[in-house]
Image (spheres, rainbow, N blue to C red):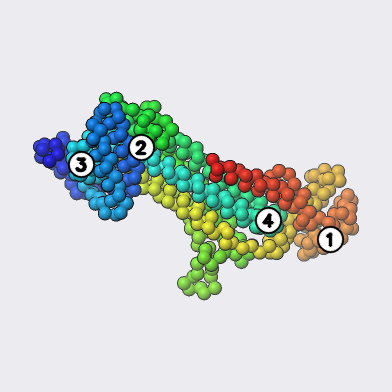
Amino acid sequence: MTNREAGAAGSSKLWGGRFSGEMSEIVERFNASIDFDRRLYREDIAGSIAHAHMLAAQGIIPAEDSEAIERGLTEIRAEIDAGTFEFRLDREDIHLNIEAALTERIGDAGRRLHTGRSRNDQVATDTRLFTRAACDEVVAALHDLRGALLDLAERQAATVIPGYTHLQRAQPILLAHHLQAYEAMFTRDTERFVQTRARVNVLPLGSGALAGVTYPLDRSMVARELGFDAISENSLDAVSDRDFVVDFHSASALAMVHLSRLAEEIILWSTAEFGFARLDDAFSTGSSIMPQKKNPDVAELSRGKSARVIGNLVQALTLLKGQPLAYNKDNQEDKESLFDSVDTVLITLRVVAAMLPTMTFDGARGAEAAVANFALATDIADYLAKKGVPFRDAHEAVGSLVARCEREGRTFTELSLSEYQAAHPAFEADVLSIDLEASLAARNVPGGTAPEAVASARAAQRARLAAERAS
Ligand code: ARG
């Protein structure tokens, strides 16, 4: 019989000492988080074992109790892993479910585990451990996606597409240049998750309910055992702070925005109207009514799922904005959205990384579209400017050529030298050699779309990715 059972009747809750009545069923359901926070069981058990080790090392509980706690928790973890553990709604959350089950197994030693600890610093610790692992997984998934983008850019090194502004054809670019722009976005995302991880990795345990605890805890020992870089410096902040959850949502939302933009390009490219890309059957679906359809569902869902992660960011900010210090039960609402952002960003990064290598491109169609619609007009204006014509005059002369061609239903390649010269006397025979290759090759500045510039940018991107992976 435990001490608790030896005590007076009253509420059956672990916190029930001062209560005389039972909680109503609807309040129990409303209050409980076990249906979702059971996902934190590994973190909760790791935190409890570290806490017990420290309590024993500090002489606060007997060493045998710490050993019994560790043994009991290890068994419970194995049962939860195996799916044989019984989670109970009347035990409210993961912390109380595990503690109550532990006490059932090991008796009073289990009732000593919560010495110098509160669920408030416990849940903050669990959530940080969970978020830290999530950051590591997201960073690895971002590395893989960036690798997939660079590999595709390499394979399609010679493929040309129109570059757009305002979704109007603007200037020819290399497809690789376009893909490498996304690699740059996902590199910044990686940085954001690495920075988030650093802010996550601070130990709240030892803050107690809000004001610190009366036992001689060794917080640094717990931090070391759990792999935290530092201990929190203010107990009130430590138990109420969920900024790191906002950081995670924020980094995730922006990564999802980037995935959504890439998905939108893939959707456009694979339409009959654009016709630059083809999706593999494994990454598209058919229509239940239109036999000819091949739909880019994976890309569309990648775009669509960005909405829920953006929603999660707004939810987390709204959750925090009216809370007085310190812990409030509101914070129980941080978990489902956090889990959702973790799951959504991970699966989306992974599915897009898996889809990219299966995509094929129609190079002839891309090259044709790249020079259609007078996309070499800037090159021809630059040609005049390089002959000493002020750029604004050159712009106007080439504009008049565009208008003439449009009127007559012709293209630049069909113009004769004398027709060029009618627009501006500075044109000479070499204007006729301005073509797609010349246009691309001319943009040989760092960051430009010339094949040479794109190849050296890609080499630098690869080196950066390899260095990040090795670190
Ligand atoms: N289930 C709670 C949560 O997720 C744990 C902390 C509860 N603390 C408390 N004093 N009621 O936030």
Distance between mark 3 and mark 4 Cα atoms: 65 Å
Q: Residue at point 60% right, 43% down?
A: 464
Q: Earlier in the sequence, mark 2 or mark 3?
A: 3
Location of mark 4 (residue):
157
Location of mark 1 (residue):
415
Q: Earlier in the sequence, mark 4 or mark 1?
A: 4
Distance between mark 2 and mark 3 Cα atoms: 24 Å
Mark in front: 3 vs 4: 3
Task: Check the image and report above or below for 340 versus 272.
Answer: above
Q: Residue at point 34% right, 33% down?
A: 205
Q: Earlier in the sequence, mark 3 or mark 4?
A: 3
Mark in front: 4 vs 1: 4
CB-based contact (under 8 Å), mark 4 and mark 1: no
Amino acid type shown at disc 2: Thr
- What kind of element bears circle 4? loop
CB-based contact (under 8 Å), mark 1 and mark 2: no
Amino acid type shown at disc 3: Ile
